[in-house]
Image (tube, coloured by chain):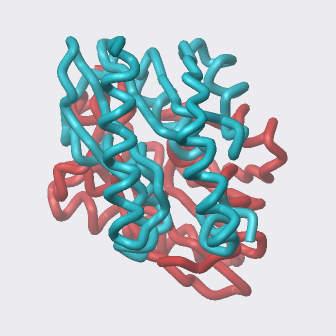
Chain colours: A cyan, B red
Amino acid sequence: MDEDQKYMQAAIDEAKLGLSEGGIPIGAVLVRDGVIISRGHNRRVQDDDPLMHAEINCLRNAGRIGRYGDTVLYSTLMPCYLCAGAVVQFGIPKVVMGESANFAGAEDFLREKGVEVVNLSLPELKKMMAEYIESHADIWNEDIGTL
Amino acid sequence: MDEDQKYMQAAIDEAKLGLSEGGIPIGAVLVRDGVIISRGHNRRVQDDDPLMHAEINCLRNAGRIGRYGDTVLYSTLMPCYLCAGAVVQFGIPKVVMGESANFAGAEDFLREKGVEVVNLSLPELKKMMAEYIESHADIWNEDIGTL
């Protein structure tokens, strides 16, 4: 298993943890120097918090680390503008995502701002997210602001 | 006092509340149909939470309101990419800010995405923020990801 897949597996574990809690199955981890320094998952439903996307939760859980220039953010799904905005503002240079088939997100914005974007395009994640969106359309549309 | 000034005063009150707590003096309110439905201020220092910018805190405090198409976000300072990303993702059509002299923020991004941007350019806020940045450069640079 290569490095990207290893860290993505940790993000997938977070997504599944979120799903088991009744939440939206999106997970993220933040990696520095080959070490996962923070984990998080979408907690909109669990915390009734519209801002608690997986990447935001992960960055929040990292605490006040100050500098992000040597970190990589892994997310099971293409980040939206909120999460991409956090990446750009804090200067995270690289984002690795599990898939973008279910959500185009803010890929253009990330690339335009010089962020390296890697899409692993994992069938397992495409299937999990597609099933969730089909069975929970309202919560999903609420999460991305398209209700 | 016109409407914009009235709501901005509520955001200024939030900024001053944050300052009195030892935090970064940035405040925000969310308005719908002429009513302030949520208030917030930067809580990075108070909560040790790097994501808790004023606009994020305000949107979080609003709870799961679902639709944002008829809201206006007031912030004492030009939103950064994180907060502008939230505005764009959730479809908030208008942002009114107190000033942008101390921080250029993500004005271009907001306008590019079709968000109406109004800058009240208030001397009181320029002075308050300039004094804070001068006396707390490290915290400020941490807040905007430029440590």
On the image, which quarter does residue A133 sit in? Answer: bottom right
Residue A81 spot, x, y in % from top left: 62, 42
Which quadrant: the N terminus of chain A? Answer: top left
Q: Quadrant of the C terminus of chain A?
A: bottom right
Residue B120, percent from left and from top: 65, 54
Q: Is residue A82 left or right of residue A51?
A: right
Tell me if B82 is positioned left or right of A78 in this view: left
Position of residue B138 measured from the top left corner of the image (x, y, whole percent): 21, 28
At horizontal 72% and vertical 32% (from top left) the residue drawn is B108
> In the figure, B6 relative to A106: above or below?
below
Q: Is residue B53 left or right of residue A129?
A: left
From the viewer's perspective, is residue B104 above or below residue B49?
Answer: above
Of A89 and A126, the residue lying toward us: A126
- Going 37% across and 68% down the picture, which residue do you hit? B14
Q: Residue at x 30, y 13 (%)?
A: A70
- Whether residue A117 is visible, yes or no, is yes
Left or right of B138, for residue B141: right
Rendering quarter of residue B131: top left
Residue B58 shows in the view: no
Instruction: Between residue A2 and residue A147, name the one nearer to us.
Output: A2
Measured along the vertical axis of the image, is residue B19 above or below residue B79?
below
Image position, residue B91 (x, y; %): 73, 59
